[in-house]
Image: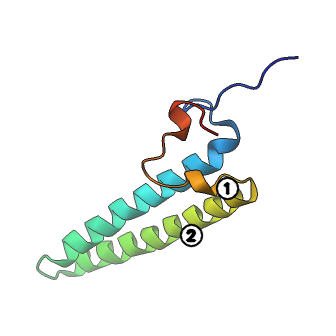
Amino acid sequence: MQAAATPTTNNPGPLIWVVCHNEAARDADVLLGEAHRLARLKPAPTRQALISALYSGYHELRKEAGHSAERALNRGLLLFCWPSTKVLQGGAA
């Protein structure tokens, strides 16, 4: 019988939901930061359209992060869904 592989960044196994959550949450935060930065600039029609698109992307990524967190919760992995988790660096799960 072969032992189960230790989850890593390259082979997350069941921790894929942790990876998906953390990546979606990180990307959402980047979009939100960019939207806020653009909102502080002088208003322009093109800029307003870009800000709106960034907010839409932010909301979709947050929704995806929520779905991934729910899947992680169902597998008992919600504890690892946070930005600085080290679970994929040493198989703590």
Comes first in the chain, label 2 or label 1: 2
Q: Is residue 86 above or below residue 42?
A: above
Q: Where is residue 81 drawn, in percent x and y? A: 55, 54
Please state which amino acid type lies under the numbered disc 2.
Lys
Q: 10 Å neighbourhood of mark 2: few (<14), some, or many (≥20)?
A: some
Position of 68 compared to 37: left or right? right
Q: Residue at x 78, y 21 (%)?
A: 3
Indicate the secondary structure of the residue bearing disc 1.
helix
Q: 10 Å neighbourhood of mark 1: few (<14), some, or many (≥20)?
A: many
Question: Hey, which quadrant is residue 2 in on the image?
Answer: top right
Position of 8 compared to 36: left or right? right
- Residue linked to disc 1: 72
Q: Residue furthest top?
A: 1
Please state which amino acid type lies under the numbered disc 1.
Ala
User: Tag count in the figure?
Assistant: 2
- Quote the CA–CA distance across marks 2 and 1: 14 Å
Q: Residue furthest left?
A: 42
The foreground one among 68 and 85 is 85
Q: Is residue 10 above or below residue 84?
A: above
Q: Where is residue 74 drawn, in percent x and y? A: 75, 59
Q: Residue at x 21, y 78 (%)?
A: 39
Q: Where is residue 11 drawn, in percent x and y? A: 62, 30
- Residue linked to disc 2: 63
